[in-house]
Amino acid sequence: MGETTGTTRTAGVTGSRESERYDVVVVGAGAAGLNAALVLGRARRRVAVVDAGEPRNAPAAHMHGYLSRDGMPPAVLLAVGREEVARYGADLIDARVEHIEPAGAGAGPAGSVAPGFVVHLAGGPVLHARRVVVATGLRDGLPELPGLVERWGQDVLHCPYCHGWEVRDRPLGVLGTGPGAVNQALLLRQWSADVVLLAHTLALTDDERERLAARDVRVVEGRIVRLVSDDGRLRGVELANGQVVPREAVFVFPQPVPRDALLFGLDCARDDNGWVTTDRTGRTSLPGVWAVGNVADPRAQVVTAAGMGAAAAFALDHDLAAEEVERAVVRYRASGAAVPA
């Protein structure tokens, strides 16, 4: 069977194609969305991937912990992924999805409702889909400290498993801007013997201070006023008393904020923390809608997100196939054909 080739385009350019019906529209072309599209394309499903071009890991020079892709720049992974997805006939659309709405009622497998969906793109075009995958990721809510955003993803870091090896054995700091800072500092001792917790506004308990002391993590009191950089490198952290604590890299625990406005609009169920709830395949409470990657799991790394996309694609294809079998049976019965003996 020969391969087909998809297209990369900007919404509104090619006219009538935007009104065509897809089996699945994937919103978000990160690892989760692209891997879902790859599996679905190989299953000969008609797929569109819509992406606004705002990957969470854009500031990072390299990604790690992904077998066979360790050290690859994130942008390269996404470019390769887009090429692979297009090879199986998926349409890659550079656009922003404004909202998604159910198209109407229809019978789905096992009595579920699979109405199909209308996906509205910015500027007016719409896509029609039988199913939708939301893989829009999250954004990192960073503390408002001067000099922090400029170094984010370079020597201001979050995940020790992503970046700890690269800063091993160097003077490291942990910014006490949230309740996860103590555990982050304790964990980082695996990578460096010189770890400082800059307490900032944290009120440390006696138990926390004991644990930090036992692991030789020094606590520096005082409110942080800014991060100091020279010649494109972090030099240290300045406190309100004027002291600059020399550090070559610092870690911060950001507040993960899911980019889930599309799921809000579809009224998908959420947990007590406000995150969308899904089953193990990414299926949400609304039949026909899946959510995968960081929009559903803030802890998912790139390799995990890719796996979530594949799991969703397998479930989606089974869901579509079950619906097609049911419709075929209805048509078969309506034709009056005799059931084979």
Image: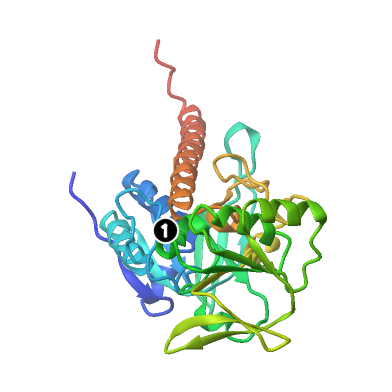
Instruction: Classify mark 1: helix, strand or loop.
Output: helix
Residue for point 72% across, 57% down: 267
Determine whether 330 is above or below 17 in the image.
Answer: above
Residue for point 59% across, 58% down: 295
Look at the image and tell me in which quarter the C terminus lies: top left
Look at the image and tell me in which quarter the N terminus lies: top left
Q: Residues within 10 Å of mark 1 (few under 14, many from 20)?
A: few
The answer to whether 240 appears left or right of 119 in the picture is right
One can see residue 144 in this view: yes
Determine whether 57 is above or below 205 in the image.
Answer: below
Tell which residue pokes out farthest to the left in this image.
2
**Residue occupied by mark 1:** 165
Tell which residue pokes out farthest to the top in this image.
341
Determine whether 338 is above or below 59 in the image.
Answer: above
Front residue of this view, candidates 61 and 172: 172
Image location (x, y in percent) of residue 185? 62, 59
Give the colour scheme of this rendering. Answer: rainbow
Image location (x, y in percent) of residue 191? 48, 56
Residue for point 38% across, 80% down: 13
Image location (x, y in percent) of residue 194? 54, 63
Front residue of this view, candidates 19 and 174: 174
The answer to whether 113 appears left or right of 309 in the picture is right
Residue for point 49% across, 47% down: 308
Q: Amino acid at mark 1?
A: Trp
